[in-house]
Amino acid sequence: MVFNEWSLVLFTVLAQTAVGMLLVSEIARKTASGPVGAVLSRQLPAVGVLTAAALLLSLSHLGTPLHSVFTILNAGSSWLSREILAMGGFFAAVVALAVVRRRNPEAEATGLAVLTMLLGLVAVYVMSRVYMLVTVPVWDSVSTMLGFYGTALVAGSIAGGLLFGIQSNRDASLAGETRSRIAGVFILAALLGLGLKFVGVPLEMIALDSMNGLDVSGLAMLASDGTVLLVARMVLTFLGTAVFAWAAFRVVVSHENGVMINAGLCAFGLVLAGEIMGRLIFYGTYLRIGM
Amino acid sequence: MLKRPAFYIDMEACTGCKTCMIACIDKNDLPDGVLFRRVTEYAGGNWSRNANGSYEQNVFAYYLSISCNHCENPICVRSCPTTAMHKDENGIVTVDHDKCVGCRYCEWGCPYSAPQFNAEKGKMEKCDFCRDYLEQGKPPACVAACPTRALKFGEYEELAAKYGADNVVAPLPDPSITGPNLIVSPNRNARPEGSRSGKIQNPEEV
Ligand code: SF4
Ligand code: SF4
């Protein structure tokens, strides 16, 4: 198996984490009863930093990065052009929303927030389509899309939940009820993401079963380097989500914050490892029809 | 110049000698590991039991010399984000190096392994149908070099009329994906497209 796509692995995982974090934190903000104060104030800047880092990392994949301005020229037919436009649009919207909220922390900016969320959803959709190439049957499956949205929700809510844990720990004024509701949103989103990932597994197996002209299937490529990786990757993501859900549930029932930071860090580490491993497997099992 | 340039392979005549491949490397001064044309060997076969208990084999092998097919609906062109990959006014699919960003997306998609990454230049390169030779009225280097005259080139319609257009053999991909300008006269052993009776052999040679 060739693990030579590190820049794309990190780009896709980070970009999806950023989108998920934005989606979940905005929903949490709307769901919270009463004022959230400053407890979610760091979410948007973090989303911006993650997106910028992801975009910069993607440049290192290019043979001639200086020509990257040309990459939006073929939006009419290239999913890759559309991906760059969608991610760029998402980043711009995040920056705009962050600026508005910084000027006036009370501002809801609902219109802009909804637009940013939509752009995020579109960006993940387009990102999946980039890989759903008719000549690459291992990727040309709904499981690619389920996997990408799953990563967004799982990694995004855990990253957001961890940040929320840190900030709310410092903010004793936050009402217990509000605290519970926000934590609840983070849990539900993480579980939904995990669900998407597991629904995708059987479809992924079917896609991996396709063969190339050498009579090698994606499954065979994995088998030769250890199915262990495939299983380990799922166990890590599952464990991470479970640890996170447990910690956040403590916040919901007893408004107890302390555990959120340590357990959140641990959960984020597990999930990040799982997702990166999963993405390495994804690129490593690239297989194309023809010759 | 041709309007719709196409390659023709007579599989019955091709011996798999790879002279076309070498002529192409020479003409384009290609570095190690970069091939604009490749001669793929496809082989298979099994033992089968006769009624009297004896065994018989049906081993087969054949070759396909494939470069870029300058397709009518090229997946490389439709997925290239920069429009660097384009079909020019002569029907030749070429990379504009002033635009190519070296993302290698064309390489992911093309089912003929035609786009080749030049790591030194950080850009994609590929068969340009020896455009310069065509302009001088000469045949492409690969066609000129073939010792058995198995490889020909010409106007797609003319070749199709002469040899028939819809012969697709394994391991060529479904032609409806890209609409390749490629005409094939099948070898007597040729297996149909999508067949699993053989596989590509010695992949390290191509
Ligand atoms: S053979 Fe491949 S590179 Fe050549 S035109 Fe067709 S799709 Fe493009
Ligand atoms: S490597 Fe160059 S020619 Fe190929 S898709 Fe990318 S920009 Fe287009």
Image: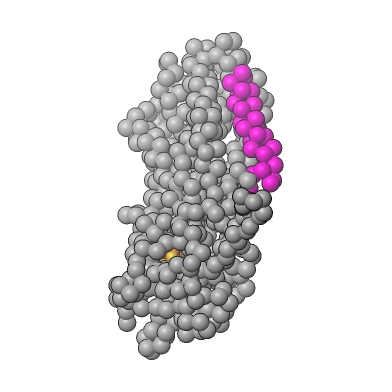
Q: Is residue A224 visible?
A: yes
**Figure quarter occupied by ligand 2:** bottom left
Name the spot of residue B80 as percent of width and height, x first: 41, 60
Whether B183 is drawn above or below B107: the answer is below
Q: Magenta stretch mostly in which secondary structure? A: helix
Q: Residue A53: percent from the left, percent from the top?
A: 54, 47
Q: Residue at x 57, y 71 (%)?
A: B34
Q: Is residue A239 magenta?
A: yes
Q: Which residues are magenta?
A: A221-247
Residue B2 is left or right of residue A286, and the answer is: left
**Viewer-closest of A50 and B57:** B57
Residue B72 vertical placement versus A201 (above, below): below
Residue farthest toward the front in the current orientation of the protein: B52
Q: Quadrant of residue A241?
A: top right
The total of numbered circles placed on residues is 0
Q: Residue at x 46, y 61 (%)?
A: B169
Q: Is B132 on the left or on the right of A282, as rendered? A: left
Q: Against A152, is A88 above or below?
A: below
Residue A117, relative to residue B8: is it above or below? above
Q: Where does residue B25 sit, x and y in percent of width and height?
A: 56, 78
Residue at the image position 36 percent from the left and 78 percent from the top: B154
In terms of depth relative to the viewer, which is nearer, B202 or A76? B202
Q: Nearer the viewer, residue B31 or A156?
A: B31
Image location of residue A162, percent across then percent down = 59, 28
Please tell me whether residue B25 belongs to the stretch shown in magenta. no
Q: Residue at x 55, y 43 (%)?
A: A209
